[in-house]
């Protein structure tokens, strides 16, 4: 048998590792900053630094920059070794690396500028979406090239997870990025209302599944056995883990939409599959923990194993909690609250963060041919991070549940006991404690940066690590009855196709009926398209990321209909490109802001935007004084109307030409109305448009008439 | 091009069957998976699970 000599590319691993650490610290810093903004609203400095724009920056930085680079670091290290081959192409590796960093930089610039699509974790504008597609294909090309020229016959289970990640993220990204550009930077979602919501949470939940989970499970199945120096507890269990997980995960999205206007059958589907997810998830967690069988004594001394044990435990906690939160009765309490924020941070800080740190401490000394600078610092990092998670999660659990109960509390006379603002005031000390937790976690990360910096200084990068392995023989004797196993386990392309089929089943059964069945979205004849001014106002609402703190979806509970008015109907959202239901109520729901008891005067809104606390004492909403300065971009009105027409919104033919006249007429009316309230403002200012939008909300069905 | 988004098929009833269909699909899929795992050859399973550890070129530097 001929032994071939080759070299592993460690330079690309090093690059991704550096990016992971730097973006990680930046993403966490952004998180800490926005956490503090909820305690001290004065920290909303200028429009570029307001909570609504920075929160997407934090989530995107942590998901795509920190964890994204972490994935690539781990994949580029482990894939080469599992395949006994250098990466397919150094050029592709470098394009992938620099392309991904450019995308992150573009995101970091565009999000504070308010350039967003207004869909959680899919905020990035269409040119960046296009760039992500190209770079993702390059990553896949490089990965498959490596797998095909491998010298190890079998595909280890970690590679299965990488393949499923690649193919599913590609599908998710393509479907979610269905958008119609109307300018070089802006676009509208193809989908509207209920359909947009379903696509969004099918995407959103699977971003958690296939970006934050499956690739990291691949890393767990490689790095945990390496760190423990023993094989995975049960390879069979890992096979079951893999296939059940990818099959079930893809269905779980609708659990983000329980009790909303989403058709009931889709909600039930989401609940059942989310609940079943506990089994493969815990199978995987148990597999991870039992890999340490006979090595538990080492966990006491080995800081890398400590990080990994906490990571796998956090995975277990988050994947126990997830199915529980998906139960309708639990969701009724937890949805829209900080309980969910606590839940995702157990996942992000615990599972992703701790596993990334473990891998970094394991890998960096190895590729630099040296030893870790300080074990003590790493230990301190471990404790800071672990305590940070606790200080973060516990106050948020407590406060989230408490706030939800306060929202639902009635007096003996059957009136709501607390105003929304009272529940916000209650939250402040908990927000402060959460910031402390985040601060501890970030401090730990900074210790790691220093520790790794000193480690790197003490060694020298083994850029091309020499290796040798026998070439793969073409002919292999078949064992009787073994053929169909091998067909999958040795063929990456078959694996890709099968993974694709498995994830498409869920996607198709869930998405297609919602698009096809008319009865799923009963139309309401009184629901009309937005006026041009309201549309402009709505786009400002999207730009400012109002959906980050305000929902537009009233659930059919008495506590909500008392507070916000009639519960929301699917037919009310048919012209909402994109939908803005939101997922969190840091502020109150706005679905009926312009109708019923919630209706306020134009003057109230004007003053509230200028200085929220002047109208609602103790409000933590950022101020929007720039709405009073900036003019409505009427040059875009025509293009917006045309785009909406293409998407099926029934504006009259040729309306794009006359829309601005209508816009000015409505704006002048509002400006005149404000004069009666002693407010003088030119009608072309943004504040007029956003007031028009808010006053429109919920008014369509004051006299409901259902056609269907 | 975008009509499919707005133009719903007029009649496509019995949406309730979808959850049932999906559950049955998963059940069958899981059965096949169990058979697959059960039939895996033991020596091969050992061989597979040792792939990450099976590296001759691994630098053995560690102080942790």
Image (spheres, coloured by chain):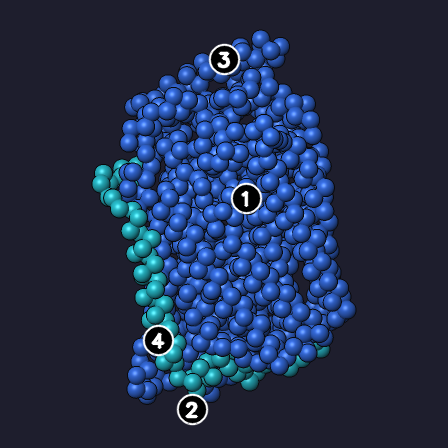
Chain colours: A blue, B cyan
Element under disc 1: helix
Q: Residue under circle 3?
A: A668
Element under disc 2: loop
x, y percentage for residue A680?
A: 60, 12
Q: Chain of mark 4?
A: B
Identify the residue at image location x=47%, y=77%: A235
x, y percentage for residue A501?
A: 33, 61
Q: Nearer the viewer, mark 2 or mark 1?
A: 1
> Outermost residue toward the bottom?
A1
A417 lies above or below A119: above
A41 lies above or below A233: above
Q: Residue under circle 2?
A: A1
How much space separates mark 4 and mark 3, taking CA atoms?
A: 72 Å
Label 2: few (<14), some (14–19) or many (≥20) C-alpha neighbours in 10 Å? few
Label 3: few (<14), some (14–19) or many (≥20) C-alpha neighbours in 10 Å? some
A71 relative to A380 in the view: left or right: left
Q: Nearer the viewer, mark 3 or mark 2?
A: 3
């Amino acid at each position: 048998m001929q032994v071939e000599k080759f070299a592993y590319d460690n330079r690309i691993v090093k690059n991704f590792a550096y990016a992971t650490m730097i973006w990680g610290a930046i993403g966490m810093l952004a998180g800490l900053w926005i956490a503090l903004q909820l305690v001290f609203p004065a920290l909303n400095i200028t429009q570029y630094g307001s909570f609504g724009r920075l929160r997407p920056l934090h989530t995107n930085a942590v998901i795509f920059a920190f964890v994204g680079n972490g994935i690539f670091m781990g994949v580029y290290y482990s894939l080469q070794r599992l395949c006994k081959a250098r990466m397919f192409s150094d050029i592709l590796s470098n394009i992938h690396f620099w392309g991904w960093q450019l995308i992150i930089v573009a995101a970091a610039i565009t999000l504070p500028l308010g350039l967003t699509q207004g869909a959680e974790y899919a905020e990035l504008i269409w040119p960046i979406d296009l760039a992500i597609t190209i770079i993702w294909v390059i990553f896949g090309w490089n990965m498959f090239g490596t797998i095909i020229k491998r010298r190890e016959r079998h595909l280890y289970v970690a590679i299965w997870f990488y393949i499923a990640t690649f193919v599913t993220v590609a599908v998710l990204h393509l479907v979610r990025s269905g958008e119609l550009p109307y300018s070089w930077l802006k676009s509208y979602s193809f989908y509207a209302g209920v359909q947009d919501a379903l696509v969004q949470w099918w995407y959103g939940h699977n971003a958690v599944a296939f970006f934050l989970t499956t690739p990291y499970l691949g890393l767990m199945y490689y790095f945990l056995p390496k760190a423990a120096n023993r094989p995975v507890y049960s390879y069979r269990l890992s096979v079951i883990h893999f296939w059940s997980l990818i099959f079930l995960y893809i269905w779980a999205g609708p659990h983000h939409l329980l009790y909303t206007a989403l058709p009931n059958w889709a909600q039930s589907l989401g609940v059942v599959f989310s609940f079943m997810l506990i089994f493969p998830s815990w199978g995987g967690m148990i597999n991870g923990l039992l890999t340490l069988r006979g090595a538990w004594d080492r966990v006491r001394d080995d800081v890398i194993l400590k990080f990994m044990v906490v990571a796998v435990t956090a995975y277990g906690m988050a994947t126990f909690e997830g199915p529980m939160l998906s139960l309708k009765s639990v969701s009724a309490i937890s949805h829209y609250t900080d309980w969910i924020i606590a839940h995702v941070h157990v996942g992000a800080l615990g599972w992703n963060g701790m596993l990334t740190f473990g891998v970094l401490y394991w890998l960096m000394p190895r590729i630099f041919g040296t030893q870790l600078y300080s074990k003590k610092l790493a230990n301190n990092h471990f404790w800071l991070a672990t305590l940070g998670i606790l200080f973060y999660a516990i106050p948020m659990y407590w406060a989230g549940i408490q706030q939800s109960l306060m929202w639902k509390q009635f007096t003996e006379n059957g009136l709501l006991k607390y105003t929304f603002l009272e529940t916000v005031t209650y939250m402040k000390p908990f927000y402060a404690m959460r910031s402390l937790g985040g601060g501890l976690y970030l401090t730990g990360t900074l210790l790691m940066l220093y520790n790794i910096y000193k480690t790197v200084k003490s060694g020298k990068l083994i850029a091309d690590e020499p290796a040798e392995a026998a070439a793969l023989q073409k002919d292999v004797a078949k064992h009787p009855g073994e053929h169909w196993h091998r067909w999958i386990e040795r063929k990456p392309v078959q694996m890709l196709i099968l993974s694709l089929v498995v994830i498409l089943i869920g996607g198709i059964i869930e998405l297609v009926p919602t698009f096809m069945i008319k009865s799923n979205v009963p139309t309401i004849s009184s629901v009309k398209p937005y006026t041009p001014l309201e549309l402009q106002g709505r786009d400002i609402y999207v730009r400012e990321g109002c959906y980050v703190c305000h929902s537009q979806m009233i659930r059919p509970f008495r506590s909500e209909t008392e507070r916000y008015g009639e519960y929301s109907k699917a037919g009310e959202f048919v012209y909402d490109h994109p939908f803005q239901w939101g997922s969190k109520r840091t502020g109150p729901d706005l679905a009926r802001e312009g109708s019923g008891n919630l209706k306020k005067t134009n003057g109230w809104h004007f003053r509230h935007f200028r200085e929220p606390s002047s109208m609602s004492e103790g409000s933590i909403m950022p101020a929007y004084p720039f709405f009073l300065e900036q003019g409505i971009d009427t040059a875009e009105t025509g293009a917006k109307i045309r785009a909406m027409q293409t998407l099926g919104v029934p504006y009259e033919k040729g309306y794009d030409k006359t829309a601005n006249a209508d816009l000015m007429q409505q704006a002048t009316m509002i400006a005149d109305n404000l004069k009666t309230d002693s407010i003088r403002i030119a009608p072309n200012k943004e504040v007029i448009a956003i007031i028009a939008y808010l006053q429109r909300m919920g008014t369509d069905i004051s006299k409901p008439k259902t056609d269907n | 091009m975008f009509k499919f988004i707005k133009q719903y098929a007029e009649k496509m009833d019995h949406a309730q069957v979808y959850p049932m269909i999906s559950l049955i699909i998963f059940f069958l899929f899981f059965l096949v998976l169990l058979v697959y795992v059960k039939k895996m050859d033991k020596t091969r399973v050992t061989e597979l699970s040792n792939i990450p550890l099976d590296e001759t070129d691994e630098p053995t530097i560690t102080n942790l």
